[in-house]
Image (cartoon, rainbow, N blue to C red):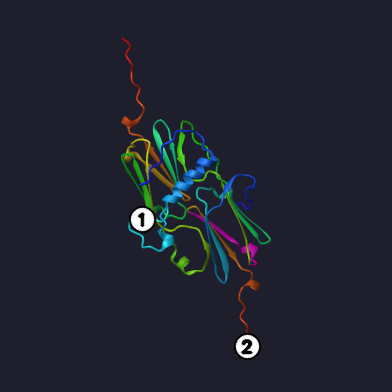
């Protein structure tokens, strides 16, 4: 998966997401159907996470006209600000059936610590 | 059933796209916000689609992110195309704490009226990465026919 995100000056739509948080990680699922893996970008700079997907140019084949379209034909892009530190090297990303699932494991210091009572 | 006006114009302005998206959103059932029991035929969400047409073929592309291939049902009756099915949520997902969710789950259905009748037996359907593509050959009688004008 490419980690370079698409440039911000191109037109884009924000994909629908679900965000779940557990004690161990934060999981973001973004609906971005119809992408090829090399066009998916995930970038983490400090606390700012950007996910994007570049749609192959919506070229209408020779001889065809578009009768109607309500599915987006532009790129996907969405940014998030994380409120916990995460372990960058263990960020996992899967793309299944058009959904990009990014799992961000929390840094140990962000996880609840068990305190021993002597 | 949602009837979509048939437009042959090439190139859609941003305003048109927004209007079409609004039309689709308003047709999406609002019952999920009002906690009503959803009827068997009522769907919580409606997939975004695109319809392209050539002289011989109609192509419909539908966005179905997160839907497994076996949960999609496509049927054609004359010039009516219905795409329906269910988007399932992983059981373990339901138990984790959601910070935010904008994703729709559950059953979906959308019926569109095609520009003309298609040959249901020769429809090709493929599904990849959340996108369903249906390639439907037009019925012979529906294709533009050259009519000879005899000059007397």
Give the quarter of the figure containing the C terminus of chain B. Answer: top left
Residue at the far bottom in the pictured view: A118
Residue A100 appears at what percent x and percent y? 53, 56
Q: Please say if A29 is above or below B78.
A: below
Residue B44 appears at what percent x and percent y? 41, 56
Q: Tell me: B15 left or right of B147.
A: right
Tell me the tag on residue A117. 2
Residue at the far top in the pictured view: B152
Chain containing mark 2: A
Which residue is found at the position 48% from the left and 58% from the top?
B103
Q: Quadrant of residue B99?
A: bottom right
Q: Tell me: B68 left or right of A88.
A: left
Within-10-Å neighbours for mark 1: few <14, some 14–19, many 20+: some
Q: Which residues are magenta?
A: A84-96
Q: Nearer the viewer, mark 1 or mark 2?
A: 1
Q: Secondary structure at mark 2?
A: loop
Taking the magenta stretch, the answer to whether it contains residue B6 is: no
Residue at the far right in the pictured view: A46
Q: How many marks?
A: 2
Q: Which residue is mark 1?
A: B42
Q: Quadrant of residue B58?
A: top left
Residue A58 appears at what percent x and percent y? 53, 40
Q: Secondary structure at mark 1?
A: loop
Which residue is found at the position 53% from the left and 41% from the top?
B15
- The residues tagged by marks 1 and 2 sit, at their Cα atoms, a distance apart of 56 Å
Chain containing mark 1: B
Q: Tell me: A106 left or right of A34.
A: right
Within-10-Å neighbours for mark 2: few <14, some 14–19, many 20+: few
Tell me the tag on residue B88. none
Q: Is residue B72 visible?
A: no
């Amino acid at each position: 998966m490419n980690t370079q995100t698409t440039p911000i000056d191109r037109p884009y739509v924000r994909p629908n997401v679900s965000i779940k948080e557990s004690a161990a990680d934060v999981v973001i699922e973004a609906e971005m159907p119809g992408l090829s893996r090399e066009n998916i970008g995930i970038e983490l700079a400090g606390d700012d996470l950007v996910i994007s997907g570049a749609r192959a140019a919506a070229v209408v084949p020779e001889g065809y006209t578009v009768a109607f379209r309500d599915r987006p034909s532009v790129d996907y892009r969405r940014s998030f600000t994380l409120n916990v530190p995460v372990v960058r090297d263990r960020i996992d990303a899967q793309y299944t059936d058009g959904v990009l699932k990014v799992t961000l494991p929390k840094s140990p210091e962000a996880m609840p610590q068990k305190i021993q009572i002597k | 059933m949602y009837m979509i006006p048939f437009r042959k114009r090439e190139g859609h302005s941003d305003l048109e796209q927004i209007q079409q998206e609004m039309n689709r959103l308003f047709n999406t059932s609002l019952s999920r916000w009002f906690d009503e029991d959803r009827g068997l035929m009522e769907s919580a969400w409606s997939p975004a689609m695109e319809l392209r047409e050539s002289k011989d073929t109609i192509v419909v592309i539908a966005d179905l992110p997160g839907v497994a291939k076996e949960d999609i049902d496509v049927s054609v009756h004359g010039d009516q195309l219905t795409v329906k099915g269910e988007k399932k949520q992983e059981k373990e997902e339901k138990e984790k704490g959601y910070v935010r969710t904008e994703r729709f789950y559950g059953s979906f259905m959308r019926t569109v009226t095609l520009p003309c009748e298609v040959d249901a037996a020769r429809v090709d359907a493929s599904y990849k990465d959340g996108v369903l593509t249906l390639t439907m050959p037009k019925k012979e009688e529906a294709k533009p026919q050259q009519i000879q004008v005899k000059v007397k």
